[in-house]
Amino acid sequence: CSALYELGGMTVMHDPSGCNSTYNTHDEIRWYDQDSLIYISGLTEIDAIMGNDEKFLNDIMDAARELKPRFIALAGSPIPYMNGTDFPALAEVLEQELGIPTFSVPTNGMHDYVYGAGLALEQIARQFVPAKAVCEEKNIQPHTVNLLGVTPLDFGAYSRAGYMKKNLEKCGWKVLSTWAMGDDLEVLSHALEAEVNLVVSSVGLRTAKYLEKEFGTPYEVGYPFVDELIPELGYERKKILIIHQQVIANAIRQEIRTRSDEQNTEVTVASWFMMKSELSEEGDLSLKEEMDYCKLVQNGNYDIVFADENMRGLVPGFKGTFVNIRHFAVSGKLQES
């Protein structure tokens, strides 16, 4: 829902009522300022048992005929996953009936936001970035870049996305599209005109790999200007723990290493969210629950911990330095003023 929020489509989560209000209340900062067509199907127990797909389809068609979305995205949840609901087939029926591009995002409620948002952006690339035959005459603009994986769950408000764009422009790079905050579907459809893709969060990695494989657009992984997030503490001979989404955490680690003697500074990255093997170093950790974090900090003898402010109180006995690096996916609106 976060990845597709601004793109003019209609996102339908096939699930019992209730999930939409949780998403709006806790996970989405744009809800009160910008409309988006995000719906719950209101799956009932009898519909789940009897497999009443006709009701699901009719409700979507009624809404789509009235609202005329740019596309329709169907997202799964645990119950239709257990029932074996054929979302690609339902999407095909809707597209044939409505003449509106329709696709499914194969979520099932059992993964984290990096997985779901990553799938959604990849589907946008597959559906709306021109096919190979059209792209043979694409016009690549020099010193241009697409930012992949920009959602509020990693970066918070628009100001952070705008900050990245302005600083890249100061360095001589023009941002053609931001996936997916601040740009609409038409802007994203011109992504192949960029010279390179920059994956600024793990959410954008699937899209980058797809665009490279299908169209040859190279990509880099990293978060630019991360140095401004890191205070001058002195990092020599320190044991440091960084907890965030993997791309940002890795960027913080690299910046720390540029400021210190790498041989005498031990830096570990950990996350509750997807940890890609190609972005991991030996010793990096995948956390499952809050207690994993508590034990790690209590037993790790860390001098400095980088994490969201709301994790500070989980280990009140920590004697080292705690550095707040905001992660909206962890704390939501708890740090909003």
Image (cartoon, rainbow, N blue to C red):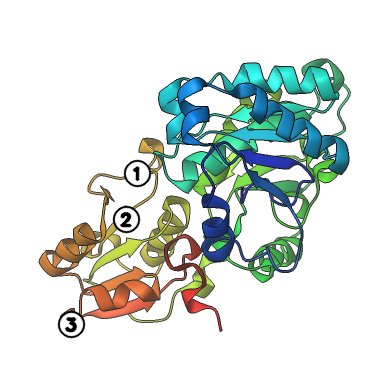
Q: Which tag, 1 or 2, sits closer to the chain's start? A: 2
Do the residues under discs 1 and 2 have CB atoms within 8 angstroms?
yes
Name the mark nearer the viewer: 3 or 1. 3
Residue 145 vs 228, above or below: the answer is above
Tag 3: amino acid? Lys
Disc 2: which residue: 269
The structure residue drawn at horizontal position 83% and vertical position 15%, both measured from the top left corner, is 133
Q: CA distance from mark 1 to mark 2?
A: 8 Å
> Looking at this view, is 136 or 299 the one in front?
299
Q: Is residue 330 found left or right of 295 in the rendered image?
A: right
| The quarter of the displayed image where residue 232 is located | bottom left
Q: CA distance from mark 2 to mark 3?
A: 20 Å
Do the residues under discs 3 and 1 have CB atoms within 8 angstroms?
no
> Looking at this view, is 311 or 10 the one in front?
10
Disc 1: which residue: 280
> Looking at this view, is 288 or 147 the one in front?
288
Q: CA distance from mark 3 to mark 1?
A: 27 Å
Disc 3: which residue: 319
Tag 1: amino acid? Ser
Q: Residues within 10 Å of mark 2 (few under 14, many from 20)?
A: many
